[in-house]
Image (cartoon, rainbow, N blue to C red):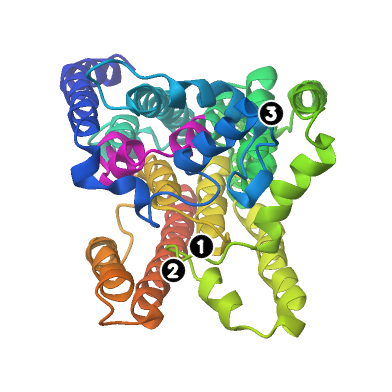
Amino acid sequence: MKEEEKKNMKTKPHFWRWAVASVIFRLVLIYFPKNLNLATRPEVSTPVTSLRRLAEGYWLTQSSMSPYAGSMYHGSPLLLSVLGPLTMKKIEGQPYHLLCSLVSVIADFISAMLIRATGLKLRMAYCERLKSLGLGKLFEISEILPSEDIAALVYLWNPLTIVTCVGFNTTPVENLFIILSLYGACIRVAPLAAFGWVVASHLSLYPTILIIPVILLLGNGPDATPRKLFRMYKKDEANNSSKGQVVNGLSEQKKFSLRPVGLFFVWVFIWTLYTLVLCGIFMRNYGGLSEMFNRTYGFILTVKDLSPNIGVLWYFFAEVFEFFRDFFLIVFHVNILFMILPLAIRLKHRPCFLAFVYMAICSMLKPYPSVGDSALYLALLALFFNELAEMQFSFFLFCGFIGVSLLSPVMHNLWIWRGTGNANFYFATGMAYACFQIILVVESVSAMLNHDRKIRKLVAAT
């Protein structure tokens, strides 16, 4: 442990230099919004996350009208009450969006620090598990760089994260609460995990499925011993009485703790009730909670806005017959639910990795995706840098993401502005983007399972 602490101390100065440099880089880009024109990009801002729409909704409330009048704003009324005033305040001689952009920069930095803290907790738990199995040397050999520092810097310097931060949208705030929920669950603090999960689900709906990784983190901890590996090790140690204490230690780690999970549900009820009360107070003159649910969650689930985005649903529902629309809505949304249970059963010993898989699947199938969604799950994937070192097609996926990022604005320009292309041009980039995400999920899950098999073989060999 002392050697690991020394390694961490050596990397800290370099980490903080790069972290501060990423913040400075964002602050510089804030002063060039008109040249970058990122707020109008469909890959960056969506009808649900656009701060321009939020400003419109706040202006309607200032005019004693419902923020959802005119079908412009479809976000949370609480987010409107917090960020709305910042969209109206202007500092003389500064860009009009400066205050909101500063909130995004702060949210990105805090998110990176939470990712780093989560990664450190995860790495220490993984190290303890390997040592309890008698494979401590494997950890020392494989641990070249601190995975938590890599993940935090991946999030801060990922171009997708940067354009999302500068793109005048609420995605950095939503990502912050998702990471806060996972961090609270990782350190097994039920109130914090419940707060992050409730707020994230309230803002974006799809983080609701993260309740399973959160429960597994609270019950088992960051890294649990797989059942097959435990049985194998217990069988081997039964023949060696000198190592009986190690077996008992593993059996204690395997027990699922119900107390933090019960506290989590209690706090979920409290935070949900508190959120609904605040929303009800805000919406008392604008139709109540039913109007809010219809204009937020209803808007997401019914896919009413078919403006182009980086996803695939907008094109599909623009072409499908109205008679079959409800059927395919059910198919697309239930498709996400069908994957939850099988993945949870197979990856229950890797809750943080399971959260990455869930977020990647939602990013592929949600009706209003953005590149900010990918930025978040790519940072979580980097937490498993050492376990996924042998993942196949890494270079192919890297080039694919770069190619899609460059081609998407080009195809959109050819279709919308120059008129020399059609919708198929832009939709092709969305299809390619979805395919690369599918390959990433499949290959990462395969690499993780192969890593677990390798650990089992090493245990069997010893």
Residue at the spot of label 3: 64
Q: Residue at x 47, y 44 (%)?
A: 50
In the image, residue 77 above or below residue 40: above
Residue 164 forms part of the magenta stretch: yes
Instruction: Give the amino acid at mark 1.
Output: Met
| Direction from residue 370 to residue 159 in the image, left or right | left
Dots 2, 1 in contact, CB < 8 A: yes
Q: Position of residue 209 (x, y in %)?
A: 67, 47
On residue 364, the disc is 1
Whether residue 251 is visible, yes or no, is no
Q: Residue at x 68, y 54 (%)?
A: 299
Mark 1 vs mark 3, CA separation in Å: 38 Å
Q: How many marks?
A: 3
Residue at the spot of label 2: 434
In terms of depth relative to the viewer, which is nearer, 437 or 317? 317
In terms of depth relative to the viewer, which is nearer, 301 or 200? 301
Q: Position of residue 301 (x, y in %)?
A: 70, 58
Mark 3 vs mark 2, CA separation in Å: 42 Å
Task: Indicate which disc, 3 or 2, sits on the residue closer to the N terminus.
Answer: 3
Task: Indicate which disc, 1 or 3, sits on the residue closer to the N terminus.
Answer: 3
Is disc 2 placed on a helix, strand or loop?
A: helix
Q: Position of residue 390 (x, y in %)?
A: 30, 58
In the image, residue 206 above or below residue 106: below
Quarter of the rendering occupied by the N terminus: top left
Magenta stretch, main secondary structure class = helix
Residue range corresponding to the magenta coloring: 154-176
Is disc 3 placed on a helix, strand or loop?
A: loop
Find residue 444 and report its image quarter.
Answer: bottom left
Task: Indicate which disc, 2 or 1, sits on the residue closer to the N terminus.
Answer: 1
Instruction: Give the amino acid at mark 3.
Output: Ser
